[in-house]
Amino acid sequence: MIKKIKIIVPLLLMISIYNIFSQNPSGRFVDKVLLPNLDTLKLNRTYSEWWYGITGGVNLNTYYSQLQVPYNPGRVVDQSNKLFDYPKGLGAGLFAGLRGEWLPFGSSWGVMIDLYLWDYRHAIAQTDIITDTMYIINPEREKFRFQTKNNFTYLTLSPSVRFSLPIEHLYLFGGFDFELIIAQNAEKITKYEHTGSIDQVFNLNYNEVKSRVGFHIGSGYDIFLADFQHKWRIFFCPFISFNAGTVVLSDFGSSWNTFMLRVGFTVKLERDYIEEEILYYNPEYTPGPVFADAITIEDRIEFPGFEFNPLPANQLAYIEKPQIIVEISEKLQITPKKVEEPKVAKTDLIDPKKVEIFNYETTSDVTLDQKAMNYLDKLAEFLKANPNFEVRIVGHSDNVGTYEQNLRRSNLRVQNVINYLVKKGIPRSRMLARARGAVEPIASNTTDAGRRLNRRVEISIIEK
């Protein structure tokens, strides 16, 4: 019991440490795009949960267990047509297919599915030097061995579980392989050791080539390759895996099997989750003055190899301590200065404390109606009369359409208000603007009336 506890506790501790320090990278970064109207579109981007790609590479195989093939594969096995063992087998091949991945946010675990549409494997196996006197007369001169060349093509489905390691972009994976045989052919060759390229070839027809079930474990690494249209990110991902499974074939009493090493790569992409924000262009903004501090010290002596201190103690100015001449006993009376509230020049129909809301009849409507223009006329007069106030403009939309479309509509509604006030002589710097799309509804979007209330521009007056 104690031995089991000693094994289980470190294992649980390792799992806990990995869960704390490893998680899927979020890919958070900010991208900025300059719009034609000189505003800046700020894109807050993170990885999505779904990735898609193509995959391919090479198979490296070593074959083991028992492969038996008769001297003449076209005849019945008997005393004159014996079975020969092929203990050595090596091979290679190619694979190509598709990959899909699901990587949930904030988790170190994910799921991958590979579909290898073409999974080709070529294998060569051969016997030892033949010494049976039934097939060889002069062992000293007639040296040969039998060889088989085997080709198998599978359609393979490989689901896997993926685990992200603490080293960013490095991950482990493991799962199962389901291999459906779709093509196979083979040759049996008698290779003579002393006659150069003269060989005897038989077609070899296997009847019991198996579809297989197996497992795999491996590791991969995600390498960022390209950014496409500020939406898609493309990755190049090399990987390596070890595969094993059930027998390849069982003809002539064989139980031939293989260990396989896949070395390949995946090119995959994902479409980012994007949160858009518009930074409005201010034509009246000018950068403030740039100040630089400098110290000029005259008559200094420098020696090679010594660093000069720009503030030596003996060059600082000496300031005498002030002396008290007369002590005043009276207490000073400090009268606080009255702070007057700013005076607001009132104009007709303008209440600085009220938030004005203007709605739009249709989803695509972004123009100002007469009611809104009448209010903006009065607002312009108020702002001219009260330079210590500015205006905040927030645009909204209903939820009809995509996120990008709704954000664009709300932005156009804000921009039309800004343009109208600018034409009335209000500086752009006195306007604080923001487009919110459909993320802040004030009514249900399931009814026409609710959607109309959500299609709005909110205008409020605030003191600087």
Image (spheres, grey):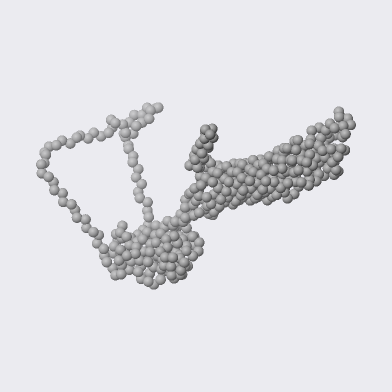
For image coordinates 63% across by 51% down, the residue present is 98
Asked if residue 118 can be seen in this view, the reply is no
What percent of the width, then of the height, locates residue 352?
Answer: 30, 64
Q: Which of 207 and 106 is in front in this view?
A: 207
207 sits left or right of 301 in the view: right
183 sits left or right of 433 in the view: right
Q: Nearer the viewer, residue 328 or 160?
A: 160
Identify the residue at the far front of this view: 1
Q: Answer above or below: position of 196 versus 403.
A: above
Q: Which quadrant of the structure image shows residue 175?
A: top right
For image coordinates 26% across by 63% down, the residue present is 344
210 sits left or right of 223 in the view: right
For image coordinates 50% across by 61% down, the residue present is 402
Q: Answer above or below: position of 101 versus 188.
A: below
For image coordinates 84% across by 41% down, the residue present is 77
Asked if residue 132 can be seen in this view, the reply is yes
Give the position of the C terminus as an image quadrant.
bottom left
Q: Which quadrant of the structure image shows residue 127?
A: top right
